[in-house]
Image (cartoon, coloured by chain):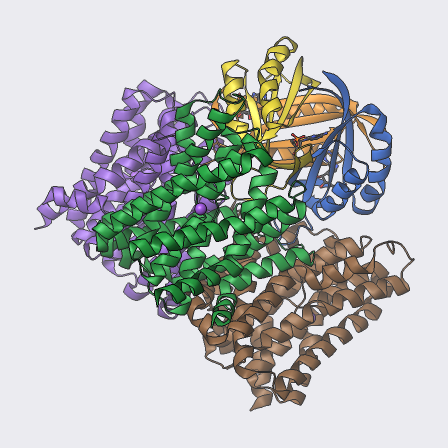
Chain colours: A green, B purple, C brown, D orange, E yellow, F blue
Amino acid sequence: MDAALLLANLANPPVLFFFLGMLAVWMRSDLEIPQPIPKALAIYLLFAIGFKGGVELHKSGFDTQVITVLGAALLAAAVVPVWIFFLLRRRLGVPNAAAIAATYGSVSAVTFIAATSLLTHLGVAFSGWMVAAMALMESPAIVIGVVLARRFGDGQGSSIEWSELLREAFFNGSVFVLMGSLVIGAITGESGEKSLAPFTSGIFKGVLCLFLLDMGLVSARRLAASREIGLYHVSFAVLAPLAHAALGIALSALLGLSAGDALLFTILCASASYIAVPAAMRFAIPQASPGVYVPMALALTFPFNVLIGLPIYLAIINRLWN
Amino acid sequence: MDAALLLANLANPPVLFFFLGMLAVWMRSDLEIPQPIPKALAIYLLFAIGFKGGVELHKSGFDTQVITVLGAALLAAAVVPVWIFFLLRRRLGVPNAAAIAATYGSVSAVTFIAATSLLTHLGVAFSGWMVAAMALMESPAIVIGVVLARRFGDGQGSSIEWSELLREAFFNGSVFVLMGSLVIGAITGESGEKSLAPFTSGIFKGVLCLFLLDMGLVSARRLAASREIGLYHVSFAVLAPLAHAALGIALSALLGLSAGDALLFTILCASASYIAVPAAMRFAIPQASPGVYVPMALALTFPFNVLIGLPIYLAIINRLWN
Amino acid sequence: MDAALLLANLANPPVLFFFLGMLAVWMRSDLEIPQPIPKALAIYLLFAIGFKGGVELHKSGFDTQVITVLGAALLAAAVVPVWIFFLLRRRLGVPNAAAIAATYGSVSAVTFIAATSLLTHLGVAFSGWMVAAMALMESPAIVIGVVLARRFGDGQGSSIEWSELLREAFFNGSVFVLMGSLVIGAITGESGEKSLAPFTSGIFKGVLCLFLLDMGLVSARRLAASREIGLYHVSFAVLAPLAHAALGIALSALLGLSAGDALLFTILCASASYIAVPAAMRFAIPQASPGVYVPMALALTFPFNVLIGLPIYLAIINRLWN
Amino acid sequence: MESVKRIEIIIDANELREVCRVLEALEVSGYSVIRDVTGRGDRGVQSGDDLTDVFKNSLVLTACPAGSVAEIVDAIRPLLRAHGGICLVSDAQWVIH
Amino acid sequence: MESVKRIEIIIDANELREVCRVLEALEVSGYSVIRDVTGRGDRGVQSGDDLTDVFKNSLVLTACPAGSVAEIVDAIRPLLRAHGGICLVSDAQWVIH
Amino acid sequence: MESVKRIEIIIDANELREVCRVLEALEVSGYSVIRDVTGRGDRGVQSGDDLTDVFKNSLVLTACPAGSVAEIVDAIRPLLRAHGGICLVSDAQWVIH
Ligand SMILES: Nc1ncnc2c1ncn2[C@@H]1O[C@H](COP(=O)(O)O)[C@@H](O)[C@H]1O
Ligand SMILES: Nc1ncnc2c1ncn2[C@@H]1O[C@H](COP(=O)(O)O)[C@@H](O)[C@H]1O
Ligand SMILES: Nc1ncnc2c1ncn2[C@@H]1O[C@H](COP(=O)(O)O)[C@@H](O)[C@H]1O
Ligand code: NA
Ligand code: NA
Ligand code: NA
């Protein structure tokens, strides 16, 4: 039955196209989706998911459950980076530990979308406003990571001003599009939804397939190119999502979420950011090596979550919830 | 009731995304929609609006009203640049006056689209073939502007050949796509319409939102960067659309247009071009400064029309028509 | 009745937009669809056609007809380049003869798509799995062309390794996307089809119009720029498709294909590749001149097939089949 | 290797066609173009973010014998005067093949 | 034509803003930017294929009088030290218009 | 600052991979790539507008000590001979950081 889940996930077109992308690199095909097309697809996905989430928020309103879930999301986003930092600092040094902490404390919008796609594929219900939780979890870890790097670092790079950092954290392009679309969706509600549905819903899954095809290409390339990744990093990149998924499932149970919402909340904890965070780290913690934290999130944790993690988490949730 | 109109306009997703784009610049977010994506979106919008307009033309045929409206459109496009030129030449000099005359004599396709989007949003009927009027109004002002610059200018830049100029005016990319799609729509009619509807209509509003997000980014940037813009330019950029809107409303009344068509005709008069015209001016009147006429059209008149102008014009039309 | 077919084909929006593109170049408009947009549109088309073909394959399964057709397709793809090579080698020399052989032995996905679009336009039924035949016919001619160039050439350029060549032939980007989407479509079947339909089918024809607009621009530019093309090349580029169409129609009759499938099979034989093949030739037969084989396929044979060839072939098939 | 001059022209993207026409008229052996160049100069910022190419530059690079520099520069100068931009000339060695 | 120095800076795309700010602070007469540059160096491959510009470089070119090279280089060096990249200075003739 | 040679290679975009492989084999300290370059030369116009990169060039820039110019040039020359393109070598000062 769990094996069935695993297969169901692998039979979902977006996942298959992600795999196709990795295959293209392994077979040394010259296939590429030229920039800035992937950037445009990412903006579209954030736009669509944000808008739809806002509309759902408009429907549900800020009832107590919504608020408690958002609170729990913030909590997770604040706790995770701290413990990761102290876990890794000895082995990897303060800068890299802080950067990885920020990376895994934040979330991966695409993994979240893949989760919603799996749920839709399986016909499991979930709350659209969970997107708001995702939006809230993007930025805090960035700030916390930098604070830790400052507090425990050798004081280098401390030249950068806070205003800059906060802008990077809360107003960077991807966060801004997601947040903005969320608010606009919440303002316009059903009327807006109807007029945009063919764009935000109709073609959504198809665009996701193309985008994941590119993600497959990029993550396989990253994995091949990463020379700074050792067994230690690999095991962390696989164990961290499992640990954080456990945390997510526990919190979901406490919050009494539905199975669908539980999976979404869990994947938010278990996923790592490779869009919002790296840009911020590159500028705020330049001593940290992007050749370490990007491949970990993009080439290891992301594929793990999309291919194996999601069905496993859902299987566990199904077991526990019934 | 008019305030209601203003709010209704502001609650229209495309307008909200335009505002979001401006907000991104003001909050110094690094959000950008990388080129050539915006160019592609613009081509899509011209393609879709042209094609649909052609189909409507196919349905309505060239009846007397269509022809009189097209005539009136040409008249407006010919008169406006002349009076603007003589109004501005003393203060701004012949080259800039001529360039601004061409800019405001021509039309803004995106403003026109925003108007149709507002009408659809409000459920007000309008004639699709008004697109033909827009297509006709794009080019004449360019030629008139250059003629005025030659006639009253110091004879510089007069080296350029007429053939080049006419090609720039009538065959530049955006005019060509609009005109071509219009003709193709008129040829294929309903059959073509049915097969293309999901592309030209279904996703249209969504694409418009993304495009206006970019327009918001660009126009806010232009405004911030424009060092040549003074109070004189600002007041002209706000008063000109009002004056031309009055002209448009008067003509619409004379022509006995429906309220919806009246708004479209009005916005054609009130809008200023920042796509077709600047490229032509840059080459035909190089002494004119793009740092003046582009920000005026793109960063002042365009936002004014989209955010405030449209509902005001419509409110007035509603008052007069009932 | 055949003239009617010709007109029906010319009244199909995609064909009209292709013509519009050529017109833009002839009228020296500065219209362009900036890269990498056309590349992205091509990936989309291959993705959509491949996926839909795979779904059809899933429905039909590999029955004997499918297998015999695929066999015949491979046969055609193997025979055509050989005879072309020996036809042209004296006149054009071994390298160019081999490159042209590969070009005309392979297929043009866009021409195939145009054919399906014409059939849909006319309401003629065809089998979606014919896409599999197209996928199979892309690569063999490349290998055969290179083998011929080696065998009869002066041994230059023979430095390149076979592994490289086979990868270029079978794993190049366009073949990979088509094949991959085909397989994924075949795996996911109806369920996948339903969820992707708005993307792969709904907007398909509209995207095709934009893409053919660009194809019109590019092929007209190529024609204008080609200085190495003589009467000999032109006549070959027009006669070859006719000869190969005859072959295709004959085989279709033998195979007892429906009229729709017969046209598709015929166009596969009659079309020439300007995507997969040129890149491979450029690297495997550098002595051959891209200024010869690309314009022949892209600027002569492609427009000929799309504008005139398709309706002619269909007219003949209709005559013979009834 | 052969000594040549390396002429670099950065000019308004809308003038690119014209620059190429000029170079072809002078029958240079060839030239290379980088279409999307942004920048800043006397005429303000060229951010390259608008729909028309009015705020975008392009770069044209041509390698030519020292002898033909003068005529090329003279032919380009009027364009620079009318539309702005810069033209840099430097020394280089051309690898003969 | 006037002798100038041609300063070429290739640096992480995320630092582009900063480099421009520096150049403007030093009031250079102008500069040109090629936004999308990939490459390889001590910090590994910059493939330019990711969503953020973390693995992308940009190229900034500025022509300036020999006198101001020193201050420009001194202002850029810390950026290169922190984020990698290279800075090349060469001679050129500027076509006055 | 340290004197180096600035090697500029403009070649068919399909050969870019190969050029990079060659440079890496020679263990250059690094190189930069501008992927989309159009142009004109003996082989006609490279308009960069087609779907394959058959009519597009790429530019590779590498700064290296004068000593290693010869071997790099010798390794690139056969590619230029087979596929066209140009290679320019000029002097530059490298800003050490
Ligand atoms: N000193 C300079 N160094 C490099 N590029 C320059 C310089 N001055 C101007 N440019 C380029 O030339 C374009 C037009 O210059 P201008 O006509 O001075 O506005 C600018 O946008 C820059 O791209
Ligand atoms: N020797 C070189 N020649 C040309 N470009 C270089 C060289 N070394 C580094 N670069 C460029 O500078 C970027 C950053 O260099 P690095 O900080 O060494 O990784 C590389 O990605 C290249 O684009
Ligand atoms: N004299 C030149 N100056 C600058 N670029 C050149 C020159 N000659 C050739 N090129 C570039 O090299 C490419 C190939 O040259 P070719 O092999 O001569 O066709 C051309 O498309 C140009 O981009
Ligand atoms: Na997380
Ligand atoms: Na107007
Ligand atoms: Na063929």
Residue A251 showing in the rendered view: yes
Ligand 5, by image quadrant, is top left
Q: Where in the figure is residue B127, as x and y percent of width and height? A: 25, 57
Q: Is residue B288 above or below residue F19?
A: above
In-image side of C108 versus D52 (left or right):
right
Q: Is residue C22 above or below residue B18?
A: below
Q: Which quadrant is home to the C terminus of chain A?
A: bottom left
**Residue farthest to the right?**
C154
Q: Nearer the viewer, residue C50 or C10?
A: C50
Res. A195 image quadrant:
bottom left
In-image side of B148 versus E13 (left or right):
left
**Residue farthest to the bottom?**
C322
Q: Nearer the viewer, residue A211 or A19?
A: A19
Q: Is residue A244 above or below residue A202?
A: above
Q: Where in the figure is residue B159, as x and y percent of width and height? A: 53, 28
**Residue farthest to the top?**
E67
Res. C231 image quadrant:
bottom right
Residue D96 showing in the rendered view: no
Residue ID at (37%, 69%): A123
Q: How many marks?
A: 0
Q: Where in the figure is residue B42, as x and y percent of width and height? A: 42, 47
In-image side of A286 versus B267 (left or right):
right
Q: Where in the figure is residue B307, as x and y percent of width and height? A: 24, 39
Residue ID at (64%, 84%): C252
Residue ID at (77%, 33%): F28
Q: Is residue A93 above or below residue A204?
A: above
